[in-house]
Image (tube, grey):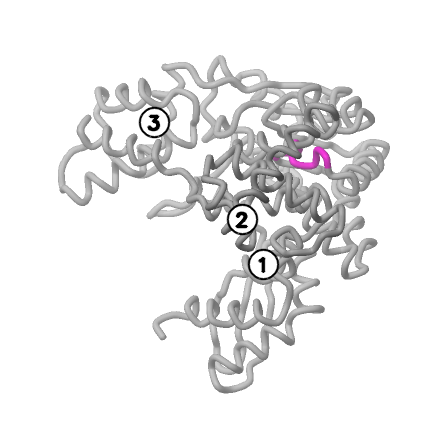
Amino acid sequence: MDSFGEIFQLVSDFCRQRMTQVAHNLWIRDIEPVKLENDTVYLSVNSEFKQNIVMEKYSSVLAEGFESVLGFPVKVVVQCQAAAPEKEKEDTEQEDGNYEYTFDTFIVGPSNKFAHAASMAVATHEVSSYNPLFIYGDSGLGKSHLLFAIKNEVTKRRPDVVVTYVKSEEFTNELIASIANQTTPEFREKYRRSDYLLVDDIQFIAGKVQTQEEFFHTFNALYEAGKQIVLTSDRPPKEIKTLEDRLRTRFESGLLADIQPADFETRIAIIQRKAQLLHVDIPDDVAEYVATKLKSNIRQLEGAVKNIKANSLISDSTPTILIAQNAIRDILSDNQPVPVTIERIISEVGRTYQVSPQDIRSNKRAANISGARQIAIYIVREITQMSMAAIGDEFGGRDHSTIVYAVRQVEQNMQSDARYRETIEDIIKNIRDS
């Protein structure tokens, strides 16, 4: 076996056989293997909360897994190292170091100037009148960059301040786990001791009753204590249809700052900045070509520069428009595979309706499970356009007529129940924008 990473993959598989899929996804799947030293294995997670849960609840099964794979007993040590979410990791990694999400590396243009100024004000003033600050705009326009810039700036200026960054999906997952493990007080303490609470993609709490209830009280506790709250979303509060009114009014009570797609000049500046960081010389005509073709997503611009550099190194030539064309084609066709999308849909529906993914795929007929299953089937059909037969295979081998019935049932319910329809529309938008 070539690497500790491969060893840990076998251990992860071992653990998967001894716990529920939900527990494995929450606590084991994203653990980072660090090293094996003598009879001790070192693992890393990205939050103190997760570190405590893994050590308390799952260190024994991890130890069993390592002994099964290695053939001798080991001590398991779980370390905590804060890390950007997976979606951001893609953008931060590069061959010669990490792309730092700071205000210095944020390219300011007419489309984001207001959001940038508001974020700077929040980060540099101990008391801000912009509370909460709600930044919204389409995916890939720099919202997460601004959150990390705030975090980095506050930490640099005031190291003693507690800054907590979390994606709303992670907040939901941690809440579910805290309820299951009877660690709700620790969960609340983690977030309510924050001086700055930065929440990415807050739209994902829409429709999730328990998550909205918990976040409402967390929001109030921090706000009343004069702590700063910054939220990002792909749309303004009024357009998050299944967001509770009491949360909507609180989100709108501070400052709303939108980010629009970058104009041509800003896109050129972003390409040049990324090229500088990656130590690749991109001719002006190539940069202009990329900026003309990729208009709506900064993440795609940065991905194109990475791709251009890689292809230039392979061909041992200066970047050309032909290389840029290939890079853009690769990026625009780089959609998630259908199996990943289906898992994402089932997981999101399960979180919204408090049903496990295993139950959605099962033959259980309880009303809440059947209802969630029908919605998952409908959304899979809506997003993937798979055939009814193929969808049936994904849901335990159900026949064509069962899938047709589920889709029609959801369509009828959507026509007669506005709240039901809005919840499904929010789930679909969240999946498509993730």
Label 3 sits on a secondary structure element that is helix
Label 2 sits on a secondary structure element that is loop
Q: In this view, does 73 lie above or below 392?
A: below
Would you say 236 lies left or right of 32 here? right
User: Foreground residue, 237 or 131?
Assistant: 237
Image coordinates for residue 334, horizontal then vertical, percent: 36, 38
Mark positioned earlier in the residue sequence (2 or 1) = 1
Would you say 95 lies left or right of 31 here? left
Q: Which residue is drawn at 52% across and 67% down?
A: 12
Residue type at numbered disc 1 = Val
Mark positioned earlier in the residue sequence (3 or 1) = 1
Residue 153: in sight, yes or no?
no
Of the two numbered discs 2 and 1 in the rendering, the one whose residue sits closer to the viewer: 2
Mark 2 Cα-neighbour bin, 10 Å: few <14, some 14–19, many ≥20: some
The residue range painted magenta reads 201-207
Residue type at numbered disc 3 = Ile
Q: In this view, does 160 lie above or below 198?
A: below
Of the two numbered discs 3 and 2 in the rendering, the one whose residue sits closer to the viewer: 2
Image coordinates for residue 169, horizontal then vertical, percent: 64, 43
* Alpha carbon distance from label 3 to label 1: 33 Å
Q: Do the residues labelled 3 and 2 touch (CB within 8 Å)?
A: no
Say which residue label 1 marks.
45
Say which residue label 3 marks.
271
Q: Determine which of the numbered discs, if any, sits on residue 399 in the image.
A: 2
Label 1 sits on a secondary structure element that is strand
